[in-house]
Amino acid sequence: MTVGFIMMCHTAFDRAAQVARYWGAHGAPVVIHVDARVSRHDYMALGRQLADLDNVSFSKRFKCEWGTWSLVAAAQAGAEQMLRQHPDVNHVFLASGSCLPLRPVAELNDYLAAHPQTDFIESVTTAEVGWTVGGIDMERFTLRFPFSWKKRRRLFDKYVALQRRLGVKRRIPGGIVPHLGSQWWCLSRATLSAILQDPDRATYDRYFSRVWIPDESYFQSLARLHSTQIESRSLTLSKFDYQGKPHIFYDDHLQLLRRSDCFVARKIWPKADKLYTNFLAERPAESVAEPNPSKIDRLFSKAVERRTKGRPGLYMQSRFPRQDHENGKTSAHYSIFQGFSDLFENFEGWLAKYVGARVHGHLFGPARAEFAGGAAMFNGCMSDSATLRDYNPRGFLTNLIWNGRGERQCFMFSPRDTQDINWFTATDPNAQISVISGAWAVPLFHSNRDFADIRREAARLQQIEIDHLNILRSMYVKARVRIWNMADFIENPMEPLQTIIDEISPRATRRLTEAPQMVDLTGFGQFLQNLRNQGMQPRLMGDFPVHGDLLTQPPRRGRPYLVK
Amino acid sequence: MGLRKAIRLRRERRLRQWRGFRKRRQLKPVANRTGQIRPSDVIVFCTLRNERVRLPYFLRYYRNLRVGHFIFVDNDSNDGTRDYLAAQDDCTVFTTKGSYKAAAFGMDWLNHLLRKYGTGHWTLTVDPDEFFVYPFCDTRPIDALTDWLDTYDIRSFPAMLVDMYPKGPIDAVPYREGQNPFEIAAWFDAGNYMISRNSHMQNLWIQGGPRARIFFADEPLAAPSLNKIPLVKWERSYVFASSTHMILPRGLNRVYDAWGGEKPSGCLLHAKFLSPLTEKVAEEMVRREHYAGSREYEAYSARLSSQPDLWTKWSERYINWRQLEILGLMSKGNWA
């Protein structure tokens, strides 16, 4: 008792011949189907190469076009020939010319001998498959497909749409429940001959010859009628990507293939010399392992995910998502602090102490990008030049977050800085934006500039901050936004600070023990009144009494927002 | 695309083809071995001038990737480049005394040769200091990539220019003939690239790297473009529009995914900052045959004397293509 192979070939005949020789020489009969479109010259050459093997034969040739009945007809012809000419064959294995046996024939024979009545054919009802291309699954069986999908896509689609609108439905012959699955199967002699000798075969053939991609459904559906024991998986390791194209194996997959313990793999790159020499070499049959392709599955599903989703927050030469299709505008969480560095002395230093993060100064400051620690350059060779940064501020930010992967980035912001990123950060779910509105006035309050200048500058900064706050209060915001006015914030700074810091590092149980040092605000109320007297209306600071200053409360202990 | 725009782009494409055709007589064959080209060969196209020292490694590198044939345009070299190339079995060499600048920086010549010899082939258009790196290039030859691209009907493949530089002054370590240039120029900038989309040609415009950071920090708009599409399955109707940065028809420039996914891409390691650069800059300053009034060379000569070290402590040392992939400079896409 042995396994017999049907090989469907249309290119790379040298490789096909090599594999057929391997199988034939190891006692497994091979029936080769060569596409009728292949030139006579190539066909004859293949025949000559294998002439010395008497268990390798050629079956009737069909013109095979992808997704059509011809593929099933060719497999039927091959199977009939196999069953007729080789009575010792107990299982028939459908393979292609780009298949490669990964384990000795004897191991496959042993495996099949242990499962004599089992049919290895992936066979799933249409409701459960997720891999159909073009969104057509059940309709494969109920519509008609006279036009080629590959060559006449427009006509194909139009005709499908027309049939859908008219509500045309083909009747499925009695007894058949449509199943789909990989076209590479291994059926027992009993099941295969039952399918081929079914008294209703003519009806089924007529029906399936008009089904779309019948090679994925003919044997898969009919095996359900005749088989006593279906193992719904293919013995051929063959993975398809999201466009329905088979993944290809190369020399560097050697170890992965070896460890997969699969019997046959497809599709092999014809020039993968190392794979062919390694797997077609003489080896003792010793392993009884079950096929385990999970590692390869993972490799390929990761590849598909990379192609369809990509790495979040990465902008590069072959990934440049348009707005709102970024799948991650940035690659990691980051925090923006507006007004904090104006209100507190050395806020950056204080923050760095409490959060495990990289705390930058004003990255978008007018003079330069103030990287953490006053550095002139950041990871990835990012320059601190304001001109370079402002040439593409959004790119600067996404680069910074990408280059700082693995470490949370925090930076200061103010109305004095480049504002071009405001919409971007407001709509980025990775951003945590905390604003103390009006705090930009504190440096002006401390400056010795001419008051007319100060008034003009205050009006300008206030307008910029109002515009920014309007963005932060719009309905499109995806960032985690918190806004306090200055008066409210200084009344009780510890509670908001604790909230922000808990959000940045949620697992840190460290309590804030010391408040950042607030700048001296004596006379700030009078300063605001002076601005008012000069005709400018400071609107963002909240209520500061003109005389007598707000007293900051001592920091409270315990988590104030925690309900016990 | 509106009709008017389509007409404009078509006219531009035709014009470039015509320029190439008109300049064909400038090219004198030195060694024409194009008869040897097999239908499945990947062909390298290259314009050069006085690159004799770099050639042995260049040829070795690309032969190693299983490139089938080389077609060179020699722009009046006087250092033996022409004879050296003419003696190679897999090289076809044309020579010209024509102006590099007047020939659209060599593109007119190459467009003509690409059309004549490249049609139907995968063509790789590179400079002699550009080394093509693609996913799995250490284990899979270039025809593995092109075969794969064929199964997906992809006709063009991007490879961004990555400027490589040595640690210390550029001219400190002399380059020996046959040496891997990246033993000396082993460093690069990993994450300071600025990208925008060019709606006219639909390509991405990438700038950045050491050249932007050092020579063009005050004038980023003038920083050199780094986006390139060197690997193309050539058709008669194709034409490079501006070096290999852009190609027409413009659909070939859509080598990036706009819906969040990653298409496969490679890199061109650029061994420009390698001795003898100072001499070369001096020569080019006299010849004035380079792009945008040799603006780039002016910037180099101004800075090279005062600050010759491009290296910083954030520079990344080149290891292999996987490193470039992890850094996000290139991608495997769905090739596994």
Image (cartoon, rainbow, N blue to C red):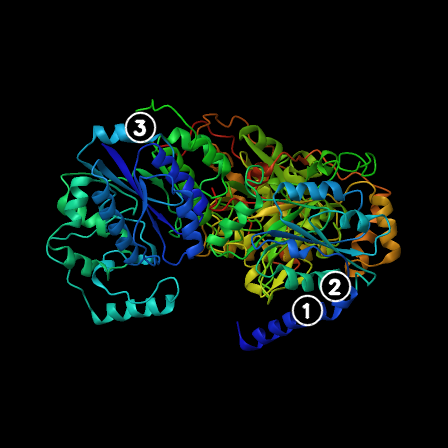
In percent of width and height, residue A491 lies at: 51, 39
**Occupied quadrant, residue A249:** top left
Task: Categorize mark 3 by other alpha carbons within 10 Å: few (<14), some (14-19), many (20+).
Answer: some
In percent of width and height, residue A153 lies at: 37, 65
Mark 3: amino acid: Glu
Task: Categorize mark 2 by other alpha carbons within 10 Å: few (<14), some (14-19), many (20+).
Answer: many
Q: CA distance from mark 3 to mark 1?
A: 62 Å
The residue indicated by pointer 2 is B104
Q: CA distance from mark 2 to mark 3?
A: 64 Å
**Residue situated in front as seen by the camera: B51 or A359:** B51
Looking at the rendered structure, the secondary structure element under dot 3 is helix
Looking at the rendered structure, the secondary structure element under dot 1 is helix
Tell me, yes or no, whether dots 3 and 1 are on the same chain. Answer: no
In percent of width and height, residue A382 lies at: 66, 42
The residue indicated by pointer 3 is A107
Q: Earlier in the sequence, mark 1 or mark 2?
A: 1
Subunit that carries the residue with mark 1: B
* Lateral position of residue A399 relative to residue B261, left or right: right
The residue indicated by pointer 1 is B16
Task: Categorize mark 1 by other alpha carbons within 10 Å: few (<14), some (14-19), many (20+).
Answer: many
In percent of width and height, residue B4 lies at: 57, 77
Give the numbered dot on residue A197.
none
Looking at the rendered structure, the secondary structure element under dot 2 is loop
**Residue situated in front as seen by the camera: A226 or A199:** A199
Q: CA distance from mark 1 to mark 2?
A: 9 Å
Residue A305 visible: no
- Give the foreground label among 2 and 3: 3
Residue A490 visible: yes
Task: Determine contact: label 1, label 2, CB under 8 Å.
Answer: yes
